[in-house]
């Protein structure tokens, strides 16, 4: 099935393709399996480890091609302190120390505390990983996966998966279309020339 057909396919077919694409990357699989031991509840593997591996599968590239790091997002609203997040980050450093690429761990419930100062855009607090995904810069980025205790992958895609399968990068909101966004899009287009970059919403 080609990417245009997948973009219009039913949710079950899309989710199956996402699961197979992510598990084709041995590092992504290792992160998912070990994340169960991290001690956080609402978590997911997000960002490039998901959508870039889907692009790899769509274009015949090997799993892991172009994936620079692995974003492990979690959402803990019970403790928004930096100390609590740092404790999780330190546990992750031990858990993933032998992997060939970095694993970045962040509490999405804290993002609103620092995002505006760093990026110039105010963010509302979120209380779940799915809500956090809706704040990502592009619709194609708003897909994540997590593994349950039985080793089954759940796909989270609160905004659907059409852009990811059509290989379109466009800002999800006007404020997201920044020079950094365009520079990142250009870097990705160099890795996946099939990618289409659009600046309109």
Image (cartoon, rainbow, N blue to C red):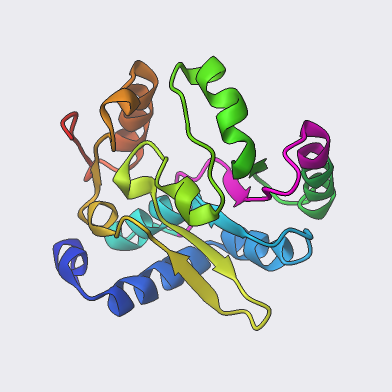
- In the picture, measured across the screen, residue 170 lies left or right of residue 53, that is left
Q: Residue at x 47, y 30 (%)?
A: 123
The answer to whether residue 87 is magenta is no
Between 132 and 143, the residue placed more toward the observer is: 132
Report x, y in % for residue 155: 45, 68
Q: Quarter-wise, where is residue 175 in the image?
A: top left
Report x, y in % for residue 1: 20, 73
Residue 50 seen anywhere in this rendered image of the structure: yes
Q: Residue at x 64, y 44 (%)?
A: 101
Between 5 and 121, the residue placed more toward the observer is: 121
Report x, y in % for residue 171: 27, 34
**Quarter of the figure that contains the C terminus:** top left
- In the picture, measured across the screen, residue 52 lies left or right of residue 140, that is right
Q: Residue at x 55, y 54 (%)?
A: 128
Q: Quarter-wise, where is residue 54 in the image?
A: bottom left
Q: Residue at x 37, y 36 (%)?
A: 137
Residue 47 seen anywhere in this rendered image of the structure: no
Report x, y in % for residue 82: 77, 32
Over which residues does the magenta segment extend? 63-86
- In the picture, measured across the screen, residue 73 lies left or right of residue 66, that is right
Question: On screen, 63 above or below 102?
Answer: below
The answer to whether residue 82 is magenta is yes
Between 68 and 176, the residue placed more toward the observer is: 176
- In the picture, measured across the screen, residue 21 lies left or right of residue 2, that is right
Query: As drawn, which residue projects farthest toward the bottom?
Result: 150
């Amino acid at each position: 099935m080609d990417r245009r057909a997948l973009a219009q396919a039913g949710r079950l077919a899309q989710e199956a393709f996402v699961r197979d694409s992510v598990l084709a990357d041995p590092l992504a699989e290792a992160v998912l399996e070990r994340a169960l031991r991290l001690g956080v509840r609402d978590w997911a593997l997000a960002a490039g480890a998901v959508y870039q591996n889907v692009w790899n599968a769509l274009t015949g590239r090997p799993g892991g091609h172009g994936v620079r790091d692995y974003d492990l997002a979690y959402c803990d609203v019970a403790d928004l302190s930096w100390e609590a997040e740092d404790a999780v980050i330190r546990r992750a450093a031990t858990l993933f120390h032998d992997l060939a690429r970095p694993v970045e761990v962040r509490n999405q419930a804290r993002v609103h505390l620092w995002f505006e100062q760093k990026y110039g855009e105010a963010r509302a607090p979120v209380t779940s990983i799915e809500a956090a995904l809706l704040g990502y810069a592009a619709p194609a980025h708003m897909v994540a996966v997590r593994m349950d205790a039985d080793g089954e992958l759940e796909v989270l895609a609160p905004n659907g998966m059409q852009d990811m399968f059509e290989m379109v990068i466009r800002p999800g909101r006007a404020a997201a279309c920044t020079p950094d966004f365009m520079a990142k899009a250009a870097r990705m287009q160099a890795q996946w020339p099939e990618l289409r970059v659009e600046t309109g919403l």
